[in-house]
Amino acid sequence: MNQTINKYKNGSVNIWMITAIVVTVLLVGMAVLAAWFYVNYDEQKTNVNGKITIAVTDAQKAQKIADEAKFTQREKEPNREFVGPDDYGRITFNYPKTWSMYIDSDAVSGGTYTAYLNPIFVPPVVSGQRFALSVTILEKSYDSVIQSYSSFVKKGSLVASSVTVDGSNGTRLDGNFTKDIRGSAVIYKIRDKTVVIRTDVSTFLDDFNKLITTIKFNQ
């Protein structure tokens, strides 16, 4: 009798122990799983927050750049008018008011007329110096000036195309004029002279393209 009771008690104890162990294992497993979910959630949240922060920062930078570009463009307007010498066909065009101009040779006594334009101030006129715009009026024929660029066009340094302004046909050149100067130029015949208007820096290409549409000169 006592043996039966002891066996019953031992069986009950074993069941409770097994149940307790199983429950404990389940609780530990649930705790580990909960911790894993929390860590994973926290990492995902951190990643999402990081991506949001990066996106917001990029958007703010893009907006700042756009605002600065708009401000710079507004500052250029209204434009000023360039007026060349009457004896040399009186060429005119509009250029940004934030640019300064320096006339290196006014051709009062004949010869070549040269003027340089650049934002804020015009740097010294030295070999290799680049300008936002240069205006050169030569006492040379249009054909001879075009011929002087023919070797550059043949080897592919410059690309030549036709261009028309104020009812006159001319030539446009785009590419490398020297190893230091990559830009664009338009060349027109003015009476018995030839004008070359050039930008030496691709940064000013948009300004150059707008500017050349306003060119006028006496035929």
Image (cartoon, helix red, strand yellow):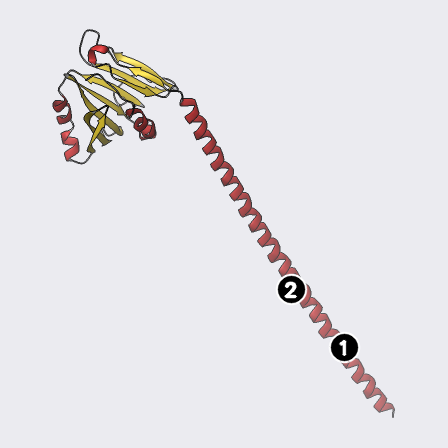
Q: Considering the image in quadrants, where does the C terminus appear?
A: top left
- Disc 1 crowd rating (10 Å Cα; few below 14, some 14-19, many 20+) is few
Q: On screen, 161 above or below 3?
A: above
First in sequence: mark 2 or mark 1? 1
Q: Tell me the residue at 50%/40% (across/down).
A: 59
The answer to whether 47 appears left or right of 75 in the picture is: right
Which of the labelled discs sits on residue 33, or is there none? 2
- Find numbered disc 1 in the image and state the secondary structure of the residue it sits on: helix
Res 190 → quadrant: top left
Q: Considering the image in quadrants, where does the N terminus appear?
A: bottom right
Closer to the camera: disc 2 or disc 1? Answer: 2
- Find numbered disc 2 in the image and state the secondary structure of the residue it sits on: helix
Which of the labelled discs sits on residue 180, or is there none? none
- Location of residue 147 in the rendering, given as x and y in whole percent from the top left corner: 12, 26
Q: Tell me the residue at 33%/30% (across/down).
A: 206
Q: On screen, 67 above or below 4?
A: above
Res 79 → quadrant: top left
Q: Tell me the residue at 14%/30% (across/down).
A: 150
Q: Nearer the viewer, residue 78 or 157?
A: 78
- Location of residue 10 in the rendering, given as x and y in whole percent from the top left corner: 80, 84
Cα distance between the residues tagged 2 and 1: 24 Å
Query: Which amino acid, by three-letter code, is at mark 1?
Result: Met
Query: Which amino acid, by three-letter code, is at mark 2?
Result: Leu
- Disc 2 crowd rating (10 Å Cα; few below 14, some 14-19, many 20+) is few
Q: Circle 1 sits on which residue?
A: 17
Q: On screen, 53 above or below 169?
A: below
- Location of residue 17 in the rendering, given as x and y in whole percent from the top left corner: 76, 77
Q: Nearer the viewer, residue 40 or 1?
A: 40
The answer to whether 29 appears left or right of 74 in the picture is: right
Q: Nearer the viewer, residue 132 or 206?
A: 206
- List the single residue furthest toward the top: 109
